[in-house]
Image (tube, rainbow, N blue to C red):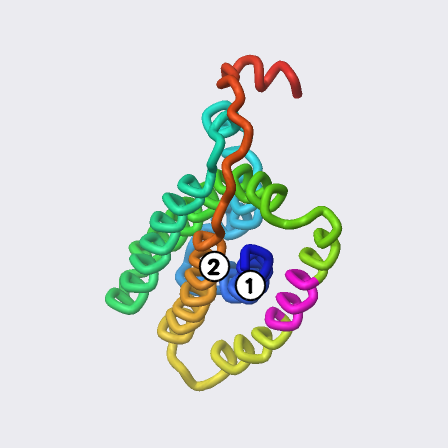
Amino acid sequence: QNFWLGVSNGVFMKGAGAFFHPTLVLAPFLSTLGAPATVVGLMPAMLFAGWFLPQLLVASRIGHHPKKIFWYRYMTVIRVFTYALMVAVVFSFPDSSVLLVVTVVLGIGIVSLANGITGIPFADIVAKVVPHNRLGTFWVLRNAVGGALGFGSGFLLKYLLGGDIAFPQNFAIVFVIGTVLSTAAYLSFSLVKEPLGLTSQKQPFRRVISRI
């Protein structure tokens, strides 16, 4: 069960990624709203930094816990709530360009940071629950099936963004689909039954940095 929950997490994440793609979705959305070019250009970098930097900062807090799934579940609540709020604002205030830009940039930033915080729990849990001899199959299924879903999502994106649906409702629908797929991904992994790991001594932040 844990194996397939992990696979479904990856599949849904790949699909959701298409609907929050920084260059295919977020950039044209923000550009149409009149966001500064600097803000639009920083979106890919923000997603990249949001994944890696939090892992460095929280490693000393998370690493010593014998079970880390509750960290993932906490971040799931934050991410789902943030996406839902973002979608609600886009639907409710379609004419407020500044509000939409601020909401989407902040929302994506918060989700990116939450994703980064879950990086360490995710890696640790996968190492515990997926047998070593099935790791290859695990990642292949996540990437292959998820890639197929992402490819199919491209056609839906073309229909929604290139059709007759008015702006920004077309992007709001895109965000809804991305939110649903992301929620399915987060909930799938949140249901993993994590066994207890070895309890280690909490490492000071300075010691963690010194080992890099």
Judging by the rendered image, the residue that carries numbered circle 1 is 8
Q: Is residue 188 magenta?
A: no
Q: How dense is the environment of label 1, judged by Cα within 10 Å: few (below 14), some, or many (20 and up)?
A: many
Above or below — where is 32 with respect to 161?
Answer: above
Residue kind at label 1, given as amino acid type: Ser
In the rendered image, residue 137, in percent from the top left (x then y), is placed at: 72, 59
Residue 146 shown in magenta: yes
Question: Which residue is at a point 67% across and 57% down the rendered structure image?
Answer: 138
Residue 207, compared with residue 135, is above or below; it is above
User: Overall secondary structure of the magenta stretch?
Assistant: helix
Kindly tell me whether residue 24 is visible in this rendering: no
Tell me how far mark 1 sits from mark 2, CA to CA. 7 Å
Of 197 and 52, the residue lying toward us:
197
Closer to the chain start, of discs 1 and 2, is 1
Q: Secondary structure at mark 2?
A: helix
Q: Label 2 belongs to which residue?
A: 188
User: Left or right of 76: which side holds 89?
Assistant: left
Secondary structure of residue under mark 1:
helix
